[in-house]
Image (cartoon, rainbow, N blue to C red):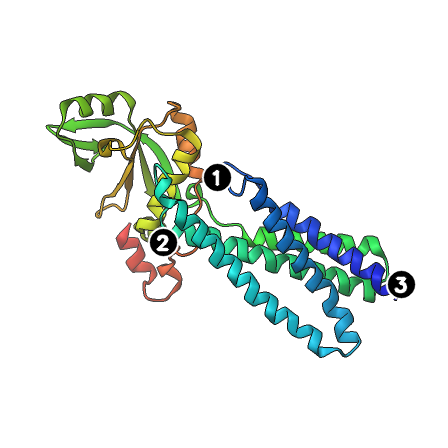
Amino acid sequence: MEIFLRNFLISISVGTLGRLYLLRVDYRQYPSYPRGIIMHLTFGVIAAALGAVAIPALLAQDYAAVTFLALAAEQFRNVRTMERENLANIEGLEMVRRGASYIEEIAKIFEARNYIVVLASLIASASLYLIPKWYLAVLTGFLTLVLLKYIMQSQKISDIANVKIADIRFENTLLYVGNINIMNVGLEASRERILQTGIGVVLEPRDENASITLSNIGQRQAIVHDVVSQLGIKKDLDEPDFTPLARRDVNTGNVAIVFYPSIQDREALVKAVGYAPVLESTRRKPSESGAVNKNDQEGMK
């Protein structure tokens, strides 16, 4: 009993600390409120406990206890639903919305983190029974966390596209970023303000896979939201002319975006765009599907 209790406490500690390690408060400021952090840490403790008791239950041939893992998976799916609903409820209060694709991406990440905690705790527990050295179990558990976190890392826009500042100009009432038409602006006062505060950015995809990925509307909306989260926006309610917009050149695949950042720093803007995540649901790789051969790809460039 004493050995079981020791192994359980070590395994659950590894899992709980791992969930704390995965719970980052970054520029998205989510979750940054105490109740949200406590909620996710509580789920982390539960996930760690499930991973910690799985091996002892199997050794004791208590297979009924292992079924709790299946119940836990159902609860973690509820976490995903809860995150999706929470973000959808506050979506209307955002000056620039995340979009459904970005919300789903965040919800999936929070669900996956609980599974990572279960695996880390499970592997730490198994290590204790194979090699009864607590420090080896802790090391194995944290190596598992680091490895799985690395596997979960998504690409960034800078990995798939070149981000460049582009000139903003008007041709009569048509707003252009580089050679890409963005929208029609009728009011002269709005045109003057856009020229004063607007900064244009062009994303040049590095291959056909990136071009198709950037054509996704949800991906473009995620980029715009990420940049506004970091640099702010010079816009208030009922000012549609100053909403950041992304438009695509269908011939080249380039995407042009006009921003009105509160922080008028072009270098920071380029970094913010490049740091935006490539959403899992928008990622496309036609070059690996076999549908497009190498000769076709060369012709598309």
The percent position of residue 263, horizontal first and vertical second, equals 40, 24
Helix, strand or loop at mark 3: helix
The percent position of residue 100, horizontal first and vertical second, equals 36, 52
Q: Residue 258 is drawn in which quadrant?
A: top left
Instruction: Work out whether mark 2 precedes mark 3 in sequence or the reverse, and give the earlier one.
Output: 3
Residue on which disc 2 sits: 209
Label 2 sits on what residue type?
Answer: Asn
Q: Residues within 10 Å of mark 2 (few under 14, many from 20)?
A: some
The percent position of residue 255, horizontal first and vertical second, equals 29, 42
CA gap between label 1 and label 2 equals 27 Å
Residue on which disc 1 sits: 28
Can residue 65 be seen from the camera position used here? yes
Label 3 sits on what residue type?
Answer: Glu
164 relative to 72 in the view: left or right: left
CA gap between label 3 and label 1 equals 44 Å
Circle on res. 2? 3
- Nearest the eye: 207 or 250: 250
Quadrant of the snapshot with the N terminus: bottom right
The percent position of residue 151, horizontal first and vertical second, equals 57, 54
